[in-house]
Image: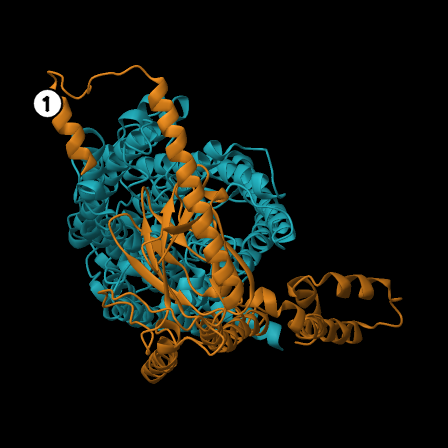
Amino acid sequence: MSIVTEQPLAKRTRPRPQVVAHDVRPEPKGWTSWVTTVDHKKIGILYLYTTFLFFILGGVEALMLRLQLAVPDSNFLTPEKYNQLFTLHGTTMIFLFVIPAMAGFANYVLPLMIGARDMAFPRINAWSYWMLLFGGLVLYGSLFFNPPEAGWTSYPPLSLGEYTPQGGIDAWIIALHIVGLSSMLGAVNFVATIHNMRAPGMGWGRLPLFVWTILIYSYLIILASPALAAALGMLLIDRHFGGHFFDPTEGGSPLLWQHAFWFYSHPAVYIMVLPAFGIVSEILPVFARKPIFGYKAIAASTAGIAFLGLLVWAHHMFTVPTSTVVLAFFMLSSFVIAVPTGVKFFNWLATLWRGTIEFRVPLLWAVGLIATFLIGGISGIFLAVFPVDWQLHDTYFVVAHLHYVLFGGSVFGIFGGLYYWFPKMTGRILGERLGKLSFALTFVGFHMTFLIQHSLGMSGMPRRIYEYPEGLGWSWMNLLSTVGAFILALGVFFTLLNVVLSVKRGARAGGDPWKGNTLEWFTSSPPPENNFDVIPRVRSVEPMKDIRRQVEQQTGVQQRHQASRALAEA
Amino acid sequence: MDAAVPRRVRRRTPPHGPSRRTVGRLPAALAPEAARLRLRRLLALAVPAAAGALLLAAAPAAADLLTPESGGSPNADSIDTLYKLILAIAVVVFVGVEGVLLWSLIKFRARKGAVAAQIHGNTRLEIGWTVGAAAILIFLIVFTFIKLPSIKNPPPTGPNGLQTASAAVYASTDQPPPPDGKGLEITVDGQQYVWRYQYPSRDNERVFAYERMVVPEDTTVILKITADDVAHSWWIPKLGGKMDAIPGYTNYTWFKARRGVYYGQCAELCGRNHANMLASVEVVSVEEYERWYDQRVRDIEEAEDEHARQRRTYDDSMPNIPDAAEGEDTGDRNRTSGQQE
């Protein structure tokens, strides 16, 4: 515990019987401590290591796909390998990277942010991590046999036994079942923790915004995942146990799969992106040195996006036989989501407005998210207009859109979170110069890769094709995109390098390197196993600001600070 | 205060490559600190401005990159118009938001002596931008529904089109027939990895084609889209939007094209050779179409005759085998016949 913060509290509470809850057992060390741990912080770190490992795998797959498409009529990959790679890439990035990475951050910082000593169910927490790892291993185990090759959406009839008899789809189904169960258990745990274990005084109006987004993330997982689980179960029954849910020759319906799949997978977009929005809402006020603008509006818009997000799934299916009334409904519901999303954006801009912005690396990623996700949000409007979607659907325009949302939104958020909370997790700050270099390369590489893909799609290139002929005007765009992808990969590499270099040798962080607003900064870095010896009473959305103010009042730092400022202005 | 600023500014200015280099080359005596700063600010504004101007100059050339394909059929043109309207609004929103973002980042970066305004929110502003965003969306919705009929409903066949064609009576709530009931209805059937087109018969002849569809110009062509095996998606970009071909379902779309050849390909992942499932539509004059049609009738009849002849020769050359179906394995036979139904 930091001594400075304890003094004023001790003064305030006067002499009274006090239980000192300092953990005196030595902290467990060695690899067994990682395997057997139920500590939310260790589990959070395990989550992050695992998901970043899968991120690297998914990234390598992406680079191979881009290499194949770099030139027309390429022979780098066979069609079979190409289909397997994009299936693995999509599945990995969504189910094994972005969704669990958010759970990883939440695991580490959420109990700290709400002033709790652990998650509500530590053992279930450990279990959900191990399920994630084993689910991932099941999917990648298929590499040694036949990886799945029906796309991450695995639409039947293509994914039925008749057309894809290989076991890859089965590995995919089982892996998603396990990973789905993992995220479900994690979600239940977050909900229980947030509802029951907040610090005294932390009402719903004082919950940190990242915690708000994790709460909504968890509810979305609980509401939407069962649809995916059911669909996966039906697919397995169709493939192996004589079912005909999706088999049109036996009265089944391929569209049933699409509805069930998107009933999960559209909310999954918000599951992936809302926590990233939460990270931005944490980073901006800290580095602009200004309270978040419109706290209630941001929290409410999170809930609004999630609720509406459950009502828009069929906008992924505008080209299937559908009556105009249904098309119109899903267009309207998709449009309505733009309103709360816009509210978030305007509040973020207003937070920066008249602040004193410090250009540290976490802020760069947060701002990069705002600048980039905006394009994804706007291209989403085009896709929501169903007649326009008839042109854009299933083309590279959609590929561009979804990467703007999931990389420009979620992954930028994850990197922002990594730079922001790394000091808390390790006690070391990630290198500033390497971080800025990494951000610049990632940002430039990302836009170079994906901006041009909008044009590719509009000039007629469908997604998921392994080759294209010369003379359609697609060659230079694809080459540009591939070059961009390698710049992007270099950017990501520098962050990974940064982590490796800084984890042992980075600048020492101390308890509160950024002058944060939330309670995770009210303990040492890394925190002791029990997190806090004393849990302060929370009086606002920014408890650390209150605590610092109190300390400054009692130690006179404020006066000294003011004196120095007067000198500077003179 | 002035003396304290420049050192901070030099570090904080976004690194516009050219500006840094130009300033670096100026002799120190000619560029006192303040002038250097002004030049740098000027360049910071000039570089984006120049880039913007360049973009504007290149706009006509880039227009093709910014809009979907069109020019073959009225529905594709209407989609293009609708798209351009959304694009116009999108550009305004994009420039506005990114502009405010960039402005705040430059204007409100941390400086010595600067104090952040401790504002927590503003309800009027909140309501303002919520209503503003909603208003833009309502405008888009209204415009979409104004444009929708010209995208969804087929127009009558033109004077140069095939006048005898009449669309078969079909029951669909999704696809209205052309107003005069005239139109050429072609069934498009997706199969791994080829498109098959079934033409309407005049008097019991069978006409079909693969991959390339030949149709008369100025004629409303109604497409009835089905699939045989897995899901496919019919898409010729210049002839309007795509429609999925889903086994067990029938989907509809239409086009009314000018003369020319239009290319496209399957847009829904349908297996390993998805990339090679090509389609093209050749639009010709009515006379040429009639000629092609008659030739096609003859070709198919000839081919069928030839096939029948070969079959006879083959059958005759084989020893006479009693019907193999009369085995004991009735259970298996039932299952097979069940699958065929």
Coordinates of residue B144 in the picture (x, y in percent): 37, 77
Q: Quick one: SS at disc 1? A: helix
Residue B177 in sight: yes
Coordinates of residue A345 in the picture (x, y in percent): 41, 69
B27, B219: nearer the viewer: B219
Chain B shade in the render: orange
Residue A119 in sight: no
Coordinates of residue A315 in the picture (x, y in percent): 31, 61
A496, A195: nearer the viewer: A496
The mark tally for this picture is 1
- Eyeballing the image, is A342 above or below A529? below
Chain A shade in the render: cyan
Question: What chain does badge 1 belong to?
Answer: B
B328, B33: nearer the viewer: B328
In the rendered structure, which amino acid carries the disc numbered 1?
Gly
Q: In this view, does A33 lie to the left or right of A407?
A: left
Residue bearing the label numbered 1 = B331
Q: In this view, does A485 lie to the left or right of B52?
A: left
Coordinates of residue B48 in the picture (x, y in percent): 67, 71
- Eyeballing the image, is A480 above or below B255? above
Residue at image point 46% right, 51% down:
B296
Residue at image point 33% right, 85% down:
B124
